[in-house]
Amino acid sequence: MVTTAVDTREAGPREPAAEAILAFAGGLHGALVAPGDEDYERARRVYNAMHDRHPRLIVQAAGVADVMAAVTFADRHALPLAVRGGGHSVPGFGTCDDGLVLDLGRLRGIRVDPAQQRVRAETGCTWADLNHAAAAFGLATPGGIVSTTGIAGLTLGGGLGYLNRRCGLSCDNLLSADVVTADGSFLTCSEEAHAELFWALRGGGGNFGVVTAFEYRLHEVPDILGGPTFYPLDAEVIRRYQALIARSPEALGAILGITVGPPLPFVPERWQGQPVIVVLTCWSGPTAEDDGIRAQLDGLGPVIGQALQRMPYPLINTLFDELLPAGLRHYWKGCFSGPLGEEAIAVHLEHGARIPCLETATLLFPIDGACRRVAPEATAFAYREAAFATVLGPSWRDPADDERHLAWGRAYYRALQPHVEAGGYVNFMSADDGGRVPANYRQNYDRLARIKARYDPGNLFRLNQNIPPATPS
């Protein structure tokens, strides 16, 4: 049994002396950006435009040595430390006010070993980078569904995407990780070395250090049958989708969404702007079975529009890039659930009928197949027996619409509460979900708190869905 420790750091950061900042800057191979510098406004921006923050210093790291120096400097001067990989953190954890932002975007090296079916990627890589490099050899590892997402945050939270049913979560395919811990040490962890830290990194988020490189297992995925199929917003479509997932081979990745009919040529004009259901398909099985997959999708309900074709695997991860560019405003809520009962389906239909705009979507990611062949205690990701990980994803453009979109997302989330688990997927959480962190990890939380106490006893890495370090009871 453990209890969480109170953060003993000072209430506010200490102002580093000008001489200390100059010495720090002089020791970096990358850049140090501060307010007033020409690049400051660009350097401080993040993907979610709701977070307009002003860091005291931004380190654009050029290598591991810069990461070690930045972590040490932030700790020494009690500066809040925000770690930014791809910058897609919806809660805005990749930035801060009056602290130090460690920007890892320049660390983009990738090396594929096709013979061993492995890839080593530095932490500033996006899924577009990794997918492109691996696809040259007909290989892939499970990633997200938007190519501009960074590999780091997605993997550390678990990693949901199209290939999960066949290949497991992103974190299930992690073979090793290079990490800079709170004391500035550099470690390479795996099942054989620093195994407790490696266990925590696979789903425990950014609580335990700065990962500077990830090594993944790759799978043969030369191409896929992929794309969206749109249906009316109808309960029977959801029921049939659940039955399809239950009986289908694991090579069928199929994510259900509730969204607005997009203005695309294959969607009839009368459905554009109307609430619809979409099934996002990624069939990585044999081409000879493509027609059978099409028939299964056609059987879910009246097809409004469909764009399903064979394509290289990286391409399916770019389909939403233009719809979700940097600079939108986002507020997400996440939850795990079992199979959807009639009351839960009714909630989705009620709130889906009032979906606010084209950029907003509710997505249900199946958690089965290869995901369930990993025990709930084998990694930090705790909800292996869930049927779905759901994200309610309000996203919009105009700050004047904040209240309307926030109200829709929060009301939807409240209405789902009787039908979902207490916890959710950490990468779908907003900044106001900190109180849910123990529920997100359930039986694994106490172990994570003990590992946190070992590797970050002062809670330097606290700008995240935070797990405070434990103290003995």
Image: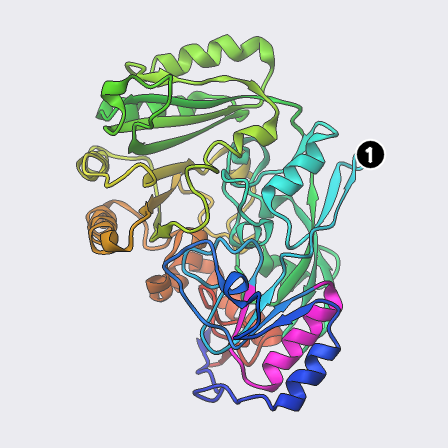
Q: Position of residue 336 (x, y in %)?
A: 36, 46
Identify the image quadrant of residue 142. top right
Question: What residue span does the magenta drawing correspond to?
Answer: 62-83
Q: For the point 60% across and 31% down, which residue is it?
A: 314
The quadrant in which residue 340 appears is top left
Is residue 118 something that shows in the picture?
yes
Q: Residue at x 79, y 34 (%)?
A: 114
**Label 1, residues with CA under 10 Å away: few <14, some 14-19, many ≥20:** few
Percent x, y of residue 208: 58, 67
Secondary structure under tag 1 reads loop
Left or right: 4, with 173 as reference point: left
State the residue in front, 290 or 137: 137
Up-down: is 400 above or below 81?
above
Q: Name the residue type under label 1.
A: Ala
Q: Is residue 340 left or right of residue 13?
A: left
Q: Residue furthest right?
A: 115
The front one of 54 and 90 is: 54
**Residue 94, can we see it?**
no
20 above or below 249? below
Outermost residue, front direction?
Answer: 38
Colour pattern of the rendering: rainbow
**Residue behind mark 1:** 115
Q: Residue at x 64, y 84 (%)?
A: 21
* Residue nearest the viewer, comparing 188 with 259: 259
Residue 14 magenta-highlighted: no
Seen at 50% across and 38% down, the residue is: 145
In the image, is residue 254 above or below residue 187? above
User: Residue 87, how many percent across, how many down?
Assistant: 52, 56
Classify residue 131 as left or right of residue 463.
Answer: right
Magenta residue check for 66: yes
